[in-house]
């Protein structure tokens, strides 16, 4: 007949064998996926025309919808200007 301390010890050892796999780490991720911010920074670099339009918008202190509209028109004008000079 087993004593209580022997039963407790056997139960503790058995639980270690049974609980161990539950806490085991599965496969580690190969590489961490870049965050949304990092993906935006990895996009193509801004063109010279875009930078110039941005500087002009800053000089005019444009923000929000006005800036977006100005930037769109400025970039279109810059593209149109470069296309005319090539022809």
Image: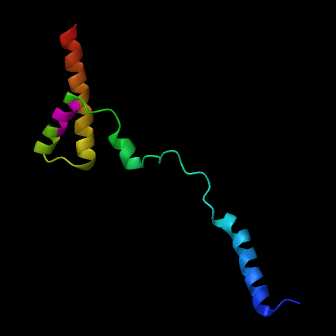
Residue 3 sits above or below residue 65 on the image: below
Residue 36 visible in the snapshot: yes
Principal secondary structure, stretch drawn in magenta: helix
Residue 76, picture quadrant: top left
Judging depth in this view, the residue of 45 and 83 nearest the camera is: 45
- Number of numbered tags placed on the structure image: 0
x and y percentages locating residue 57 in the rendered image: 16, 41
Residue 14 sits above or below residue 44 on the image: below
Give the farthest residue toward the left.
59
* Quarter of the rendering occupied by the C terminus: top left
From which residue to which does the magenta span run?
49-54
Residue shown at 37%/46% (left/top)?
A: 38
* Quarter of the rendering occupied by the N terminus: bottom right
Q: Is residue 51 magenta?
A: yes
Residue 40, picture quadrant: top left
x and y percentages locating residue 69 in the rendered image: 26, 39
- Is 28 on the left or on the right of 79, as rendered? right
Q: Is residue 73 magenta?
A: no
Residue shown at 62%/55% (left/top)?
A: 26
Give the farthest residue toward the front.
1
Residue 55, picture quadrant: top left
């Amino acid at each position: 007949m087993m004593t209580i301390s022997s039963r407790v010890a056997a139960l503790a050892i058995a639980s270690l064998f049974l609980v161990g796999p539950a806490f085991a780490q599965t496969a580690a991720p190969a590489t961490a996926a870049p965050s949304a911010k990092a993906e935006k920074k990895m996009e193509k670099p801004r063109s010279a025309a875009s930078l110039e339009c941005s500087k002009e918008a800053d000089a005019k202190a444009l923000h929000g919808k006005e800036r977006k509209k100005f930037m769109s028109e400025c970039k279109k004008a810059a593209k149109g200007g470069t296309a005319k000079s090539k022809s």
